[in-house]
Image (cartoon, coloured by chain):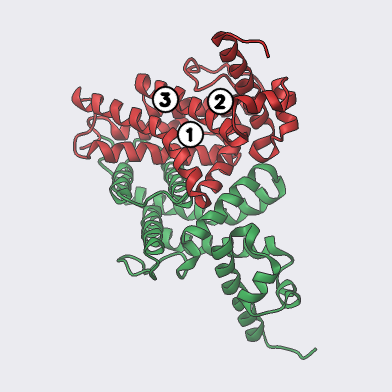
Chain colours: A green, B red
Amino acid sequence: MPRVSTDQLAARRRQILDGARRCFADHGYEGATVRRLETSTGLSRGAIFHYFRDKEALFLALAEEDARRMADVVAEQGLVQVMRELLDTARAADRGAPEDGPGNGGTPSDGAATDRSWLGTRLEVSRRLRTDPEFRGRWQAHSAALTAATRQRLERQAAAGALRDDVPVAVLAQYLELVLEGLVSHLAMGLPAGDLDAVLDVVENGVRAGADR
Amino acid sequence: MPRVSTDQLAARRRQILDGARRCFADHGYEGATVRRLETSTGLSRGAIFHYFRDKEALFLALAEEDARRMADVVAEQGLVQVMRELLDTARAADRGAPEDGPGNGGTPSDGAATDRSWLGTRLEVSRRLRTDPEFRGRWQAHSAALTAATRQRLERQAAAGALRDDVPVAVLAQYLELVLEGLVSHLAMGLPAGDLDAVLDVVENGVRAGADR
């Protein structure tokens, strides 16, 4: 077997992740069979599972990427901005068009990743979280980045006096995460994005200084 | 076949619903096999499916009951109270004890119905909502009662001057429903009920008069 450079390894890993992301988005977690993963990545199962132990490890790697990208958006612009981008992406998916709305610059991933199909795989993850403690542990480790970023941004905002100060930062962080869970669930079920921008305005104003009357 | 009274028919229907509720709570939607439904109801499959066309119809009948009971609580005490009761019930389920917390008087159903297992079946429903438009239609008809009750209560509160008036009632209703979705998803995934009371305080205060500073 010829030796390959680190760059080549990284490129191959990237190729697998991008193909797998499309596959999960199109077919859901259960529907993303090994055969379909081969087609979408353009690689053999041998090559795929040389890089990732199994389908779950591949899925968790994608989830981790998303969590990291979302954490970056959170750090820059806050969790509400992440939610606004989820809304934009769901709307773009409904139009069957690539994302073209405003504010998509920092979208957690490049298009298909956060569309409704992708959100749908989150529901399957949720089901599994209930019943598989080991999976729950691995998932939580990956989602911890988002929680930490949310907390840190709120603490910076609190220090700058931009946050309401009658409620502990930890509670505000939990509040925002609960709304995010609701939004993910709502969009994953295929319910309309509709007027949810106005709802997110309520959420955003509710954590700002001044919300404590 | 002997003729039976309307009372007897209602009692038999009740027996099936109560047994099926336990069965779905213990085993989830997929795990609630016909054999298990027979055991939990104490009736034959013939008897069960004389009253309900199929397992889905039985599940939807339970969902409809829950939606109606929740709508009653909403009408009396608001959607945030429904959420507080979901929290209490999840905590009681974690303790493995029957519900004994305060504020359980109006719990949507009698115990097992809203415990984590039951919430788990909601995740399976959510998955299915994505892919089965007919099922989505039937489910939405049943959940419409809750939406209507939420809207009506908010409109009464608005008329009484108890609600913030800088945001349309429709938006506040959507806001509360989104938080409920988040809470259901959170608890269904087996995540801790923890400090969510404080989060619900933020939500409740956020729709009240005065929240518009």
Q: Residue at x 44, y 36 (%)?
A: B180
- Earlier sequence position, callout 3 versus callout 2: 3
Q: Residue B171 vs residue A52: left or right?
A: left
Give the number of the disc on residue B89.
2
Percent x, y for residue B162?
A: 23, 25
* Front one among A66 and A74: A66
Element at label 1: helix
**Could you give the CA–CA distance between mark 1 and mark 3, rounded to whole angstroms?**
13 Å
Mark 2 — on which chain does it sit?
Answer: B
Instruction: Give the residue at mark 1.
Output: B196
**Residue marked by disc 3:** B81
The residue carrying pointer 2 sits among few (fewer than 14), some (14 to 19) or many (20 or more) residues within 10 Å by Cα, namely: many
Task: Name which quarter of the figure residue A77 lies in.
Answer: bottom left
Say if residue B122 shows up in the picture. Answer: yes
Between marks 2 and 1 in the image, the one whose residue lies nearer the viewer: 2
Q: Are marks 3 and 2 on the same chain?
A: yes
